[in-house]
Image: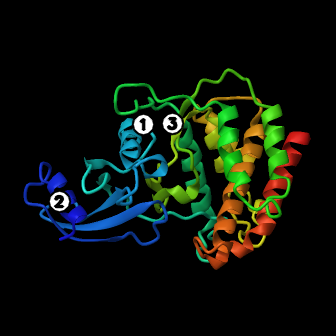
Amino acid sequence: MSGLQAAVEAALKPRWPDVSVRSLAPLEGGRSGVTLLAELTGASESSVVIKAAPEGRAPVGRHDVLRQARALDAVAGIDGVVVPTVLATGAAPTDFVVMTRASGEAVEPVLDAAEVQLPAQLVTARATAAARMLAALHYAAVPDQGDGSAEPVADLSSEVRRWLATAEAADPEILVGGVHLARLLEKALPNDGVPPVLVHGDYRLGNVVFNRERATGLIDWEIWGRTHPGVDLGWFLVFCDASLFPGIGAPVEGLPTADELLELYWGAGGSRFEDVAWFEAFGRFKMAAIMAHNLRRHREGRHVDPFQEKLPPTIRQLVQTGIAKLEA
C-alpha cells in the first residue's frame, strides 16, 4: 500500500472504523491537479475522490488543497449550492483532501459538442440551474485562511495584473492585442461599490456535475478567491458563447444567450451591477491569456498536447471581441 493510500485510509477510520482503501487511481477525465479515485470497502461510500498536492512541491496556489477544502466546507450549507462533502484531510505524505464523488457527468456544451450531443431541453435546464446556483454561491460566507485571519480581497486591478502576468509569459505573436486589452481593462475599472464575495474562479458548466437535470456537485476549486461577483459571471458567459471558439467549439441548441443567463442570475438574487461588458471583456482576456500560455508550453515541449495547435483563431477572437466590448 502506497504512503498516500495508507494515509487516506487512516484519515477515514474515525468516520468508518472498518474502512479499507482497495486502490487509488487517477480519476478519468480529471485535469485539475492531482485528482484520484479511491475504491473503498467497509464504508457507506464505495468510492471517494482525493485531491492531493504533488509530493515534493510546496502546497501553495492551485496545489493548496486544504484551502480548497475550506471553501467546500464554507459553501456546503448554502441553499441552492451543491458541492462534494469533505470527508477527511491530511498533511502527510503530502496535503490531501478526501471528498464524496459527485454522480453524473460534467459537460461543457460548446466545447464538448463534437463528442457529446445533449438534448436542447437538457442544455437549457443545466444552464438555468448553473446560473441560479452562481447567484446562491455569491451569498456564501468567505472562510478564513486557516489561521483565523481573513481571506484578502483581490480588487479588480489585481485581478487584471494577475492574468496579465500569464499573458506576458505567452508568445506575443500568438496573443496579439492581449496586452492592449489588459491596458483597456485597467483604464476602465468598474467602481460600482459591489461588495466582494466568495468566487469560484472557474465557474462554468464543465465544472458542474449533473445527473440529468439535477446538479450533484460544483467541482475544481483551485482558484477560488474573494473579489467582485462579476469575475465569476463574466467567465461563465464566455463558455456559453460558441462564436468565441472558432474551430474548437460549436453552437448548441438550447443554450441560453448571455442576456438570458444574466436575467436568470439576477432573478435568483445575484448582485446587480452596471458594467457587465467590462466583466465579459475580462473573462475573454483571462481565457485568451491561459490558452496562449498553454500553447507556448506545448510548443516548448513542457506539456505536449497537439490540440493546442487549434487555439490561435480562438485566442484572436477572444482578444478582438474583448477589445470591442470596451471600445463600444
Quickly name the residue at label 3: 136
Residue drawn at 85 percent across, 53 percent down: 177
Q: Which disc is residue 79 wearing?
A: 1
Q: Quadrant of the N terminus?
A: bottom left
| Percent x, y of residue 323 | 86, 47
Mark 2 vs 3: CB contact within 8 A: no
The residue under label 2 is which amino acid type? Glu
Specify the label residue 9 is tagged with: 2
Nearer to us of marks 2 and 3 is 2
How packed is label 2: few (under 14 Cα within 10 Å), some, or many (20 or more)?
Answer: many
Q: Please state which amino acid type lies under the numbered disc 3.
A: Ala
Disc 1 or disc 2, which is closer to the eye?
2
Return the disc, 2 or 3, that comes first in the chain's sequence. 2
Q: Residue at x 47, y 62 (%)?
A: 212
Which of the marked residues, 1 or 3, is nearer the chain's N terminus?
A: 1
How far across and how far down the image is residue 163, in percent?
67, 46
Residue 42 sits in quarter: bottom left
Q: Say if mark 1 contacts mark 3, CB within 8 Å.
A: yes
Note whether 47 is above or below 187 in the view shown: below
Residue at the far left: name it.
18
